[in-house]
Image (spheres, rainbow, N blue to C red):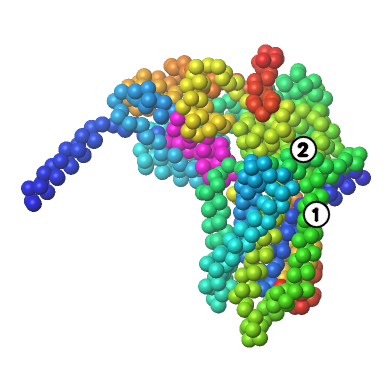
Amino acid sequence: MKRILALILVLAMTLAAASAFAETLKLGSMSPLTGPYAADGNDIANGVRTAIEVTKADGGIPGFDDITLSAQDTACDPRQAVAAANKLINDEVVAVIGAYCSSATLPASETLDEEDIMMLTPASTNEKVTERGLKNMFRTCGRDDDQSKAAVRFMKDFVKAKSIYLVDDKTAYSQGLADNVEKASPAAGIKVLGHDHVNQGDKDFSAVLTKVKAANPDVFYVSLQNSATGALLVIQAKRMGIDAVYLAQDAVYHPQLIEIAKDAANGMYLTFGYVDTEASSYQKFIKAYEPKYGKPGAYSAYAYDSAMAYLAAVKKAGSTDLDKVRAALLSLEIDGASKKFKYLENGDSGSNYIIRQIQNGEYINFWNAQTGEKY
Amino acid sequence: MDYFLQQLINGITLGGVYALIALGYTMVYGIIQLINFAHGEFFAAGGYMGVIIISYLAAQGVSPVLCIGLGLGLTMAYCALLAMAVEKVAYKPLRSSSRLSVLLSALGMSIFLQNGLMLTQGVYDKAYPTEMTAGGFEFGNVVLSYMQIYIVLITAGLLVALNLLVFKTRIGKAMRATAQDKIMSALVGINSNKIISLTFAIGAGLAAAAGIMVGFYYGSVNYSMGFVPGIKAFAAAVLGGIGNITGAMIGGLVIGMVEIFAAGYLSSEYKDVFAFIILIAVLYFRPTGIMGENVDDTRV
């Protein structure tokens, strides 16, 4: 009996020793997995999961026998984001993809930076994210200031709008964007007829929409942080008979906007990053993503690209040493699913906002904000 | 003028929804003096069950009218059963303990039900087949959608039915008796446990109807939709004089109208604040609420 026990012990020890030699690459993700932004949050976690699956299927990364993900919930709340960051530090992750809300990304990135953990955000568009001079902060999506410029240019050059009415839901993101558009409008010859705020979680917009209808603007600018809310607002606006060009932004962008609003969403315009659905990098992403997680959301591809970029940098650097990975990341030209990009010294990756339109229940590339031409 | 009329229509519709939810609050409070904070969750559960049943029936090729009718009936029955189960599990064992523990149990139940919905139905919104009820009338600039008419008609119909039940039937008599004095009514042969169960069932059924109508009116439902309307309906019940059925209707309409007019004429940002300012102002001058004076004879 004793001999058997000893044998088992020896066996267990050899096994333990063997697994101690093989290294696991631990990634973390932070996004709102619950609460009103859970749709976008789960898209982000799923994007990272897809990146890991694709990398593993391609043979993984030399020197590591496995890549794992610890997906944390921030609920879009600064305090919970810091708690999630600490949890990831305890989990000994080497990099974090996230967070979603800029207000959560900002404090969490400070916490991660102190521990020398790299953060790549797929969705935080606030200018401050990369303007604080954090060495380990990268951003794969575009910036608010660029997005509002694209929106104003579209209204001026394509719609030839004379008036605009704005509605936002008071988040740092949605209101910031609407404020930017409001400020830039007069210079483009567009009169601001009104700028209203609704509450997050509102379902009834009839009062505000009656106001919009009475003002009769050329463009109705919808800046909400939630695509489902955006759908409700559009349904009610169409029912109310508001006859304007509907323009929204990337947080309203989501497959569920079309699913819920159906016909009401047809003809609506959104500012969004340019996506080349024909590109092989996008096809590779969509083939891995769609069967498992359904249609990608607004930030699925950005999350996927962020994780792919990091993993590619680790591969190139041959280690997870922060400085080496950073140098590798800055040198890489990444042919991503969301866009072709190269991280700049400040962590940004450049914006490529265009105008997309919903036609017959699909998002299509509509107007190029750089050249001013239709696709 | 158009603007005012449109806002009036908006206000009545929203008020009707609040009123329906408020009825459940007020009835349960009337009968066991419990503020059932899980009530908003019956509204959300109704919204979900409604879309599941109606989408299923529609996929089988059932006609829209039958879809909605069956969906409404089945969903109300489902929520009634759910409420009776909740009452049995979370409130009945605590009936003789302090009111505070029942209140906490209700809050816990609310969180439990909400998370249950999230885990079983997912975090994404579920879309209603709004095309079934699309369309409406237009008078100049004023739009009156069919759904707004349905909401008002169904709400009014349910209120009339409820009033008949409470004031014209033996069950209603038993409910009123139990509300007045549980022990005495039990002594004369009323099964108060059954009556309390029934009250929960009716209240939840009405909330479920509101959930379906909201789903059709706004276009989608999600798991957290019960919380805010729940609080507003609670305010409406208090405003009307909690325990009073007509009061809950009036309170619901007032809260809905104040909210819409505040958003339309003052500031949409602070519309929720105005509704509660009215509540506080009314309670300051009439602590029993608008219809609070005859609270003892008519409460259920």
Q: Determine whether, in the image, residue A273 is placed left or right of residue B252.
A: left
Mark nearer the viewer, 2 or 1: 1
Residue B283 horizontal side relative to residue B99, left or right = right
The chain carrying label 1 is B
Q: In front here: A50 or A166?
A: A50
In the structure shown, which secondary structural element does the residue marked by tag 1 occupy? helix
Residue B63 among magenta residues: no
Residue B98 locus on image (x, y percent): 56, 75
Of helix, strand and loop, which one carries label 2? Answer: helix
Tag 2: residue type? Answer: Ala
Chain under label 2?
A
Q: In this view, does B229 lie above or below B283?
A: above
Q: What residue type is labelled 1?
A: Val
Image quadrant of residue A220? Answer: top right
Can you tell which quarter of the image residue B24 is in? bottom right
Q: Position of residue A70 (x, y in %)?
A: 41, 39
Quadrant that contains the C terminus of chain A:
top right
Q: Which residue is drawn at 59% across and 66% down?
A: B84
Left or right: residue B164 versus residue B125 is right
Q: Of B29 and A1, which appears nearest the observer?
A: A1
What residue sits right under mark 1 in the picture?
A: B152
In magenta, the rendered stretch is: A28-50
Residue B99, horizontal then vertical, whole percent: 59, 73
At horizontal 37% and vertical 22% (from top left) the residue drawn is A58
Q: In this view, does A298 lie above or below B123?
A: above
Write down the quadrant of residue B144 in the picture: top right
